[in-house]
Amino acid sequence: MRFNLLAAAFMISFTFHGHAQDRKVVYKDPDFISAVLKQHNTYRSALQLPALTWSPALAQDALAWGKHLASIDKGEHDQSVRGKEGENLWWGTAGAFSYPDMVSMWGNEQKDFKYGIYPDVAKSRGAAVGHYTQLVWKTTTYVGCALVSNGNNDYLVCRYSPPGNEYGKAPY
């Protein structure tokens, strides 16, 4: 009987503890900010573009949308910020990717990028390069990001100001 009570207490403790770890929100953590900002600025410095500055206000906006995405367990852009803020989204298996790896998924689109006037900046039809161009958009000066996990997937949302990917303009 004593063993059963101890086992039950352990299982309840483990279940609640594990559940709390599954749901993660990161947007003010200095290590998160440093890693995400450094990875963004790696791509910008390679083009001799000014470094982005962290914006707590943009991070707060990203957090709200990240919570929404985690709740519906689906990635989709926030249409309400179109023209006001730029946005990059990433999602993948919870806990499986580092912060720099997440940002690098966007930066790796560089291989399909060709310099030109947006949106004609992809080497081939259908190639995704819009995340990369937002990273390196010359007039963008601020970024703020948030990571929200629902236990199954992590959702990284980054917001940019001024927004990039402006039709009829060159990225840099």
Image (tube, grey):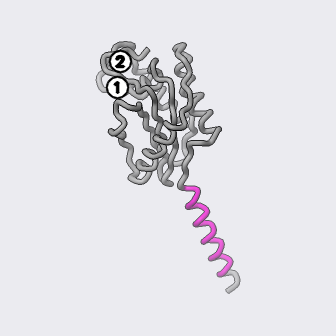
Q: Is residue 125 left or right of residue 107?
A: left
Kindly identify the residue that appears in the image at 33 percent across and 39 percent down: 79
Kindly identify the residue that appears in the image at 68 percent across and 77 percent down: 6
Q: Is residue 158 left or right of residue 31?
A: left
Marks 1 & 2, CB-CB < 8 Å contact: no
Q: Quadrant of the N terminus?
A: bottom right
Locate residue 50, reporting x and y percent.
54, 17
Task: Give the magenta range.
Answer: 5-22
Q: Is residue 16 above or below residue 102?
A: below
Q: Is residue 118 above or below residue 32?
A: above
Q: Nearer the viewer, residue 135 or 129?
A: 135
Q: Quadrant of residue 33?
A: top right
SS of the residue at dot 1?
loop
Q: Tell me the number on the disc at residue 121.
A: 2
Kindly identify the residue that appears in the image at 48 percent across and 41 percent down: 156
Identify the amino acid type marked 2.
Val
Q: Is residue 64 above or below residue 54?
A: below
Locate residue 133, reporting x and y percent.
42, 23
Locate residue 167, reporting x and y percent.
31, 20
Kindly identify the residue that appears in the image at 47 percent across and 49 percent down: 153
SS of the residue at dot 2?
loop
- Point out the residue furthest to the bottom here: 1
Residue 76 lies in the magenta stretch: no
For disc 1, the marked residue is: 127
